Amino acid sequence: MSERNERNEQPGRTTALVTGANKGIGYEIAAGLGALGWSVGVGARDTGRREAAVEKLRAAGFDVFGVPLDVADDGSVAAAAALVEERAGRLDVLVNNAGVTGGMPQQPTMVDPAVVRAVVETNVIGVIRVTNAMLPLLRRSASPRIVNMSSGVGSITRQSESADVSMTGPISAAYSPSKTFLNAVTVQYAKELRDTNILINAVCPGYTATDLNGFRGIRTPEQGAAIAIRLATVPADGPSGGFFEDAGVVPW
Ligand SMILES: NC(=O)c1ccc[n+]([C@@H]2O[C@H](COP(=O)([O-])OP(=O)(O)OC[C@H]3O[C@@H](n4cnc5c(N)ncnc54)[C@H](OP(=O)(O)O)[C@@H]3O)[C@@H](O)[C@H]2O)c1
């Protein structure tokens, strides 16, 4: 059965939620999923930034709704799940995009442990918190997909084999390892969910010009969003537990 058929058998619109969708890559993922005719929840923790993004996406013709969502806050995440349930009754696609670097430099020998803790709280535990809160809604979908926004800097292979900063990012005790951790968690979810119709994958957007890196990236946010949109729309026989960028599989 093709994914198109599965989705067509479901009543109502395909509904997605993107975390950290008020700007950068997350905003463009929301726009890209909106362009498919989907209803898209714009997850964002700041009211003003969320409302501005929702307004802009609506002006562009997309069916979006704001979802107050701080991925580091249990209560906020529970309320977000309740809002999505009330609005759509189920969730078809979750894109865990929200992320922080913790600021640089982040030399392991000098890093403040509080920085490591804060980055893991958002980039890893935040993903687990949101995913688990949304899982009951995802289980109601005919073809649920979860996409975790990782980074090639989380690839231990690239960190070990490359001296090219465009591949590895700066030395970092928190950010890169948080994406390695996220990749490992993604694989564990895929293993647990193997006998379900839920497909979960990690993706790397490439070095993208956003607030995260002072707009030094070389790709546009729209280009960065493409791989997440691709994995959000994979058919039922698509991969699960993988790590992908535009060029293909990213080595662990
Ligand atoms: N840019 C790159 O080159 C690159 C490369 C590889 C991977 N990535 C990943 O791509 C994702 C998006 O990053 P970006 O480049 O688009 O950066 P960005 O423009 O800084 O966007 C990050 C988004 O995450 C949100 N966020 C941070 N902490 C949050 C929290 N606790 N709860 C809810 N939202 C939170 C931010 O919200 P606020 O506006 O409220 O801060 C913002 O919407 C991140 O996971 C990042 O690690 C980026």
Image: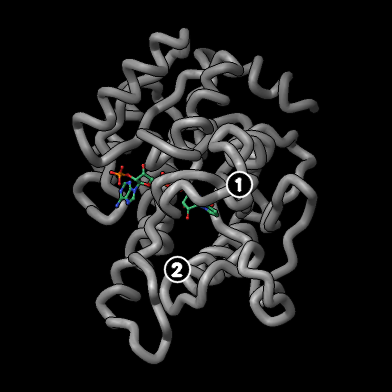
Q: Residues within 10 Å of mark 2 (few under 14, many from 20)?
A: many
Residue that numbered label 1 is attached to: 218
Above or below: residue 79 compared with residue 119: above
Q: Residue at x 77, y 56 (%)?
A: 249
Q: Residues within 10 Å of mark 1 (few under 14, many from 20)?
A: some
Q: Secondary structure at mark 1?
A: loop
Q: Position of residue 208 (x, y in %)?
A: 56, 46
Tag 2 and tag 1, C-beta contact below 8 Å: no
At label 2, which amino acid type do we have?
Tyr
Above or below: residue 61 compared with residue 53: above
Is residue 91 found left or right of 207 in the rendered image? left
In the picture, residue 10 is in which quadrant?
A: top right
Above or below: residue 66 compared with residue 99: above
Is residue 219 or residue 53 the one in the foreground?
219
Residue that numbered label 2 is attached to: 175
At label 1, which amino acid type do we have?
Ile
Q: Secondary structure at mark 2?
A: helix
User: Of the residues tagged 2 and 1, which is closer to the observer?
Assistant: 1
